[in-house]
Image: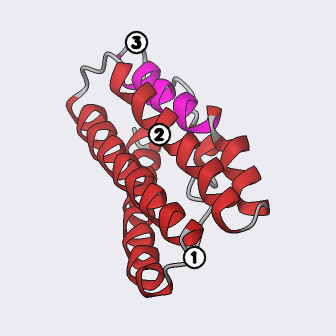
Amino acid sequence: MSSKIWFAGLSLAAVVATTGCNKKVPECNAVVDVVNGVGAKIKAGEKAQGADAQQVMQEAEEKAAADIGKLDLTVPEVKKIAADLKKNLEASSGASKKLMAALKAADAAQMDPLSKELDTARDGVSKNIEELNKFCQGN
């Protein structure tokens, strides 16, 4: 089971306002702040084992998805990336819940496919974060 620190480098996406007044900077920073806000919990999940690790990470992903959903975004690119990120965080959170159930039930037959489902969702989260960094750091 692979677990990635998908938020790595996101804090670097805090945008420096160099292009004058526009909504891109504060909206990018709002999404970055949400993801960075749960980063410590994700790191803690990386250090835990088995179902405990999944529980910590699942709760962090669920919170980040909910918090992103509360943002009032108007820049189309940021809005799309945030919506995709929210979708992938929800998918990852859901896969984590299923994997935790399989771990607790010692259902070995489900662990591999559920781990793959989780990896796919977390790969999506990582891709969204890369997209956010690229857009937000561009001029």
Which quadrant, please, contains the N terminus?
Answer: bottom right
Between 107 and 33, the one nearer to me in the picture:
107
Q: Can residue 86 be seen in this snapshot?
A: yes
Q: Is residue 122 left or right of residue 124?
A: right
User: Given the image, on which type of amino acid does mark 1 rest?
Assistant: Ser
* Residue under pointer 1: 2
Q: List the residue tagged with mark 3.
A: 21
- Residue plotted at (23% across, 39% down): 80
Q: Which residues are magenta?
A: 23-36
Magenta run includes residue 32: yes
Q: Mark 1, residues whose alpha carbon is within 10 Å: few (<14), some, or many (≥20)?
A: few
- Residue 137 position within the rendered picture, expressed as x and y whole percent measured from the top left: 47, 42
Q: Position of residue 3 (x, y in %)?
A: 59, 69
Q: Tag 1, which secondary structure? A: loop
**Residue for badge 2:** 62
Of the 4 image quadrants, the one containing the C terminus is top left
**Residue 41 horizontal side relative to residue 20, left or right:** right
Tag count in the figure?
3
> In the rendered structure, which disc, 1 or 2, sits on the residue that comes first in sequence?
1
Kindly check if marks 1 and 3 are in contact, taking CB atoms under 8 A apart as contact. Answer: no
Whether residue 15 appears in this view of the structure is no
Helix, strand or loop under label 3: loop
Q: Which one is earlier in the sequence, the residue at label 1 or at label 3?
A: 1
Whole-number angstrom distance, CA of label 1 to CA of label 2: 19 Å
Residue type of the residue flagged with mark 3: Cys
Mark in the foreground, 1 or 3: 1
Q: Residue sitting at 40 percent across and 12 percent down?
A: 21
79 or 135, nearer to the observer: 79
Q: Which mark is residue 24?
A: none
Q: Is residue 63 left or right of residue 80?
A: right
Instruction: Give how far apart the Cα atoms at labels 2 and 3 are.
Output: 32 Å
Query: Which of pointers 2 and 3 lies earlier in the amino acid sequence?
Result: 3
